Image (tube, helix red, strand yellow):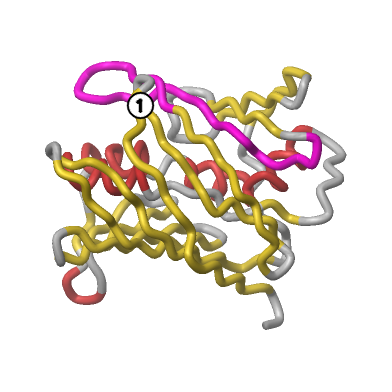
Amino acid sequence: MRALRLTLLTSVALVGVATPASAQSPLDAVALALGVGADVVSVEVRAETRATLAGEAVVVPSRRTIRRQSARWRSTLGGEPRVVALTERGAVAGEGDDAVALGPSATAEVRAALWLDPIAIALRHRQLTVRDLGSGLLRIRAPRLAEPVLIKLDARARPVRLTTFLARGGDRVYVEVVLADYRVVDGLVVPHRVTLAEGGVVRGTTTVTRVTVERAGD
């Protein structure tokens, strides 16, 4: 699970900021930050993550798809493909006939690794609790996430930093995601460089290579 957790975490990337970025409320600002506009059916992000695993530098190609009520993450590590899906009901590893439902403990691990996806899923159902702390800083809570998440937005309502605490081997670890290199892709403003740090140590940097947006009516 350690290798799975690392690759899941280092492949985190937001789906994109919906444009125009004219938020009317804290909840609207979060919606803009996560790119979950009403007409967006799904967003697929292909990326490569440079990370260190067991002291060795690795490059992990991945493909992450988030839909209205689910998220799916595919990666290749050491030539071995890995697929994990997360829905409101739980987590599944593998695809097709090889798919296996994960138990409560493993599902909790996946939710902790894909912590941005439960936020986006909850947002679609307006299940988030949002507090505007001022100066472009929002604090949000989502179902099944033990800790709140702080989102720092810039003047255009683009998230530049997300921070929270996650459980790691019985410890409470500070996690920070920094987003940069925003580009417009099919009406979404997508960060193309995402850096993840745990406990002040950079664990991986993800470069987005392709974004595909599916909208209602397409």
Provide residue 64's location: percent of width, then percent of height.
Answer: 42, 61
Q: Quadrant of residue 72?
A: bottom left
Image coordinates for residue 41, horizontal then vertical, percent = 61, 68
Farthest front residue in view: 57
Q: Quadrant of the C terminus?
A: bottom right
Above or below for 3 versus 76 = above
The residue drawn where x is 66% and y is 66% is 185
Q: Is residue 147 left or right of residue 105?
A: right
Q: Nearer the viewer, residue 207 or 30?
A: 207
Tell me the element at label 1: strand
Question: Magenta segment, principal secondary structure?
Answer: strand
In this view, 39 is above or below 114? below
Tell me what residue is drawn at x 47 percent, y 25 percent.
164
Q: Count the marks: how many?
A: 1
Residue range corresponding to the magenta coloring: 155-175
Q: Position of residue 102 (x, y in %)?
A: 22, 51
Q: In the visual, does 148 lie left or right of 80?
A: right
Specify the amino acid type for callout 1.
Answer: Glu
* Residue at screen point 31% across, 52% down: 91
- Is the residue marked by circle 1 packed among few (<14), some (14-19), or many (20+) residues within 10 Å? some
Q: Depth check: give the residue in front, 110 or 2.
A: 2
Is residue 162 magenta-colored? yes
Residue sitting farthest toward the bottom: 218
Quadrant in the rendering for residue 3: top left
The front one of 137 and 26 is: 137
Residue 112 in the magenta stretch? The answer is no
> Which of the image's four quarters has the N terminus?
top left
To which residue does mark 1 refer?
198
Measuring from the top left, give residue 184's x and y in whole percent.
70, 62
On screen, residue 189 versus residue 206, left or right, reads: right
Compared across the picture, whether 38 is left or right of 211 comes to: right
Q: Residue at x 70, y 42 (%)?
A: 158
